[in-house]
Image (spheres, rainbow, N blue to C red):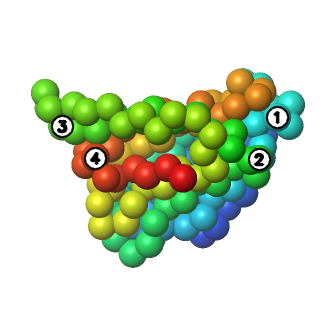
Amino acid sequence: MRALTADYTCVNEDTGTIFLLDAVGEDIIIPAAALGNRGVWFKFLCVADPITTVWSITSAGTNDIHCQFSSGAGNDIDVISAGTGKDVVSLVHTVALQGDQITMFSTGTFWMATGNTQVIEGITMA
């Protein structure tokens, strides 16, 4: 595990790391999926409600993030499916909550992004 308190650029050697995200959002860059990193994965976990700025996870590649997230609590679960060809996944400040999380897994061609948020607008994709 690694606590992030500033902007960070992930490298393949970070594979398997759970990044702990505090209340102050930062910018995280992940390698392009096509850079020979098949099997590389990262997990991003909010350990506090992001209240100041957004946590953004941006691929160094172009349109190589495929996303599917769930949202809700208890028995009220919705699926947020953003489809394919995204560049950025964000945990939104003042909306995302402690416990919200995103896992990024590289197929060697694309990043597969999955995770959950307690509020449907807590995770956005662009």
Q: Height in image: 56 above or below 1?
A: below
Q: Height in image: 83 above or below 100?
A: above
> Hey, which residue is sitting farthest right in the picture?
36
Q: Amino acid at mark 3?
A: Ala
Check disc 4: other Cα within 10 Å, few if <14, some if 14-19, many if 20+.
some
Q: As drawn, is 67 to the left or to the right of 86?
A: left
Which is in the foreground here, disc 1 or disc 3? 1
CA–CA distance in space, label 2 to label 1: 8 Å
**Is tag 2's residue or tag 4's residue first in the polypeptide sequence?**
2
The residue to which callout 4 is attached is 120
Residue drawn at the location 28% of the way across and 46% of the way down: 120
> Hey, which residue is sitting farthest bottom in the picture?
52
CA–CA distance in space, label 2 to label 4: 26 Å
CB under 8 Å between discs 1 and 3 = no
**Is tag 1's residue or tag 3's residue first in the polypeptide sequence?**
1
Q: Which mark is residue 73?
A: 3
Q: Which mark is residue 34?
A: 1
* Element marked by disc 3: strand
**Is tag 2's residue or tag 3's residue first in the polypeptide sequence?**
2
CB under 8 Å between discs 2 and 1 = yes
Q: Amino acid at mark 4?
A: Ile
CA–CA distance in space, label 4 to label 3: 10 Å
- Asked whether residue 50 appears in the rendered view, the answer is yes
Q: Quadrant of residue 112?
A: top right
> Residue 54 at what x, y percent from top left?
46, 66
